[in-house]
Image (spheres, grey):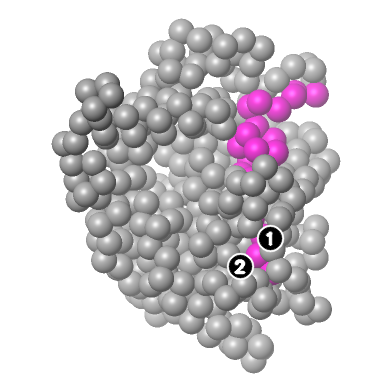
Amino acid sequence: MVVTTQIKQFDSLELESGFVLSPVQVAYETYGTLNAAKSNAILVLHAFSGDAHAAGVDAEGHRGWWDSQIGPGKGFDTEKYFVICSNVLGGCKGSTGPSSINPATGERFAMTFPVITIGDMVRLQKMLIDSIGITRLLSLAGGSMGGMQVLEWAVRYPEAVASAIPIASTARHSAQQIAFNEVARQAIVADPDWCDGNYYDKKPPGRGLAVARMVGHITYMSDESMRQKFGRRLREENGIFEVESYLRYRGSQFVDRFDANSFLFITKAMDMFDLANGAQSLVPVLAKSRTRYLIISFTSDWLYPSYQSLEIVSALRRRNQDVAYIELTSNYGHDAFLVEVDEQTELIRGFLARTMKEVGKK
């Protein structure tokens, strides 16, 4: 299916920092049909470098980042459900972000863009959902940073969420996760073309952004998946290792589609996210949730290891809340949530069917 990204503009959004973005816009796509009762809506949340194009094919022929899961007969079956995906606040694919024009100056925000949080992203999404006339989502789903948004939704708007599917995610970053993000950010700001963020009419900091993406790709894969995919094979034409060639390619490809300043702001929002708001236990904050959960992790994911999902599961179970958890066996590392299709599809399909049945009883 060919899909078109839509833009919704709102008069203003007050951020958690107190800064007011006015106006503010959000880019989004929809798939399937909203039923008359508006009870079949699912909001899909993307990982940090994603965008609103989650499924189908856009005008340039690019397939959505989760097309394997969204569509007729797939896990998120668009013959049954109305699926929405929006680009996050701070992004560079249609939603207001550092590359947007600051109406107060007529120039791009760049590094004058305000600090944003996962909570700010979710509040803008709530404004979008409200504007469509949906009072309660059948489900929310997302992997990695998308899972953080799922959790934030469930505790911030408990009455508006029937079910939640956080995948390969966490309630807060560990020191190691923050460290990887900081290395990536430093690669960008150390690029002489970064120009303190004021590079929009100049040469962008491509070398730094490419290295930042290379760091990310290393964390997304596992030792086993890299061994199987690359081993120690050399490329005959230039004598470099295949894994080196792959990382360089992925880095250069990323430069063509992502904004370096968005990288800085979004990864910082991920690092600052703490569902427990500084408390040691997640139990009190998750007690606010009225949501049934399907939580998925992967055995080889060392970036978002299973113990972080289990921390959420344990807190929910301590309050006898409805939660199903499964750790899927995979060699793909963190990328498994995008690659391991079959098992996830069956889990999601069954979970959504049960949720729809329960919603229909109420």
Asked which quadrant contains residue 130, the reply is: bottom right
Is residue 302 left or right of 263 when viewed as pictured? left
The residue that appears at 19% across and 36% down in the rendered structure is 233
Q: Look at the picture and state if 71 lies above or below 22.
A: below
Q: Nearer the viewer, residue 215 or 79?
A: 79
Identify the residue at horizontal 48%, vertical 67% (top origin).
165
Left/right of residue 162 with respect to residue 323 in the rendered view = right
Q: Residue 204 location in percent, x, y?
A: 55, 16
Q: Earlier in the sequence, mark 2 or mark 1?
A: 1
* Residue 125 visible, this orientation: no
Q: CA distance from mark 2 to mark 1?
A: 9 Å
**Label 1 crowd bin: few (<14), some (14–19), many (20+), radius 10 Å:** few
Circles 2 and 1, Cβ within 8 Å, touching? The answer is yes
Q: Is residue 258 left or right of residue 327?
A: right
| Magenta stretch: includes residue 297 | no
Q: Is residue 61 left or right of residue 191?
A: right
Question: Dot 1: what SS?
Answer: loop
Residue 113, compared with residue 277, is above or below; it is above
Task: Say the numbered circle drawn on residue 217.
Answer: none
Along the line of sight, which residue is nearer the eye, 295 or 69? 69
Tell me where residue 156 appears, x and y as whole percent: 58, 59
Count neighbours of disc 2 (C-alpha within 10 A) and say few if under 14, some if 14 to 19, many if 20 or more.
many
Query: In the displayed structure, would residue 187 be above or below residue 359?
Result: above
Residue under numbered circle 1: 1
Q: x and y percent of residue 69 in the render? A: 52, 65
- Determine the residue positioned at 61% across, 37% down: 91
Q: Main secondary structure of the magenta part?
A: loop
Q: Amino acid at mark 1?
A: Met
User: Residue 316's spot in the image, x, y percent?
Assistant: 39, 71
* Segment colored magenta: 82-103
Q: Please name whichever residue, 12 or 231, is drawn nearer the observer in this view of the structure.
A: 231
Disc 2 marks which residue?
71
